[in-house]
Image (cartoon, coloured by chain):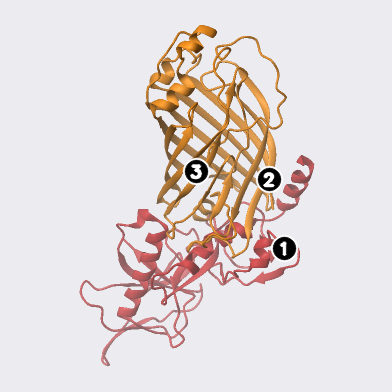
Chain colours: A orange, B red
Amino acid sequence: MDKLLALALTGACGMAAAQTPATNPMPDGSRDMYVGLGAVSAPRYEGGRERRTAALPVLQVEWSNGVFVSGMSAGMHLSAQPALEYGPLLGVLAGRDDAGSARGLGGIDSGVGMTALVPPLSIRTRYAATRLTGMDQIGYRLQAGGFFNVYLSPTVRLTNSLLYGSGHERNGLRWSVDLQRLALPLATHHALSLTAGLTLANGADSQSYFGVSSAEAAQSINPAYRAGGGLRDAHLGARWNWALAPAWMLTSTLKASRLLGSAKDSPLTERPTNVTVSTAIAYRF
Amino acid sequence: MLLAAGAAAAQAQEGEWIGYRDAYRAMVVFEKYGKPKNLLQNHLQVMPREKGASAEGLQLTLSGKTIQLNLPLDATGRAVFPLLKAAYDENAALLLNRKAGLYAFRPRVSLALRADGVYEAPELRAGCEQALQYERDVDASLRTRKCVGVRFVFGRKGEPGVKLRRGEAEQQTLPAVEGAAFPGEPDEGFKTVGYRFAEGQDKGQVVTPNPPLAIAPLYD
């Protein structure tokens, strides 16, 4: 059963013209898709003290050629070996303005993706002056890179994703490495996946999201601050999937993240430890 | 949306089930496997989670919008898994006539049976090595395991009468013991006959007058 579940909830999707992978997990021409809706509660921005709750659309699609969409990331599985996953990866990174970071689509599986993006269903409101007031806005960023995952056993996976394109100048680089325990069976049709990992970032990424330029210091309450590259955060996560029926799933996540290094010491960081919780119900098409 | 999910969940709670897509994803790995597997077979197994539950009387049905297919289970709870695009696209389910929580589903690789019931010792070793190589590809944690033998699995009644033959004159009956069909399973009521590989070159034949239910590879 472990093997089944471990394989079953791995997210993926694709493009019709791409090459069919040797380990194609479905019939040629088929796809597996989850669509759902839920809610997420998260800090307004990384390091922010205030929280907000927003609607969370869920999307995960996998096509037989290996292409997948999972939350706000998309990629393609190229590996022909069951114990390896690798391929190109695209991601959309949330923008940030004085109201905080935007929220976006969630996925069912946390294997390769990121989760934040557009604030599709939340109504934007004006907030009182915060540490983000006067800071330059950062728009949504399309990141490109790749992922490389190794199954140490059918239920233990080491995941890596490297994405480039974040930050003011779109030259930020992030590397996320996670150890995941997949499909820990809690009870029939209940599965718990656990994650522990680190995120590293280059100086451009860190300066964009945690640095304060002289100009920004002049128009905000923050002192000028130079954020350097290195460890960005350490995080722990849990995902609980409850298969209600063959076509219905309740998926819930809890993620605790601790900012590290210059991100932690940034004047923008009011609370270095952030917790995000979400739950959504999804239909499998 | 919540009401629809609740109704579907209530209906699904009546019996054990697994999504066909999830089972397909696990089972198709063997079909796609490109290394030697001519001595192997792969089944979907319905396995009791605890002692006391047997596979007797179990019925497994593939159920979709346009598909209703009974999948016969052997005495060890294994069924030939049909790889059907229509069932996948319909998001069909595999239904079991038992309440939820008593059984689990898993892929099960075993050695293929021979119609004549005569198994050459080197062929048994080769079959075990093929099974181990496949399982290593799927599960990297088995990298250090070695093949040590095979287990012939028979029904609960009768004597297996498995013989090890080395030449015309030398023949011995291998002892049968009660045990699980496959290592780690809770149902230990099968008659099983173990055959350990020799340290050196394997010689002789294992003869099964009565066809076994399964031949399980044994790793150490």
Q: Amino acid at mark 1?
A: Gly
Which residue type does callout 3 highlight?
Val
Q: Is residue A241 left or right of residue B109?
A: right
Residue on which disc 1 sits: B64
- Residue A112 is tagged as 3
The residue located at (53%, 64%) in the rendering is B27
From the viewer's perspective, tell me whether residue B1 is left or right of residue B129: right
Image coordinates for residue B132, horizontal then vertical, percent: 36, 65
Badge 1: few (under 14), some or many (20 or more) residues near its Cα, within 10 Å? some
Residue at 49% of width from left, 58% of height from top? B186
Of circles 3 and 1, the one toward us is 3
Where residue B59 sits: x, y (%)? 66, 67
Whether labels 1 and 2 belong to a single chain: the reply is no
Q: Which mark is residue A79?
A: none
> Closer to the camera, A123 or A254?
A123
The residue sitting at 44% across, 35% down in the picture is A196
Residue A116: x percent and y percent?
58, 33
* CA gap, disc 1 and disc 2: 20 Å
In the depicted structure, whether residue A272 falls above or below residue B192: above
Kindly identify which chain the residue marked by label 1 belongs to: B
Callouts 2 and 3 close, C-beta under 8 Å: no
Residue A35: give its label. 2
For numbered disc 1, what is the local secondary structure? Answer: loop
The CA distance from mark 3 to mark 1 is 31 Å
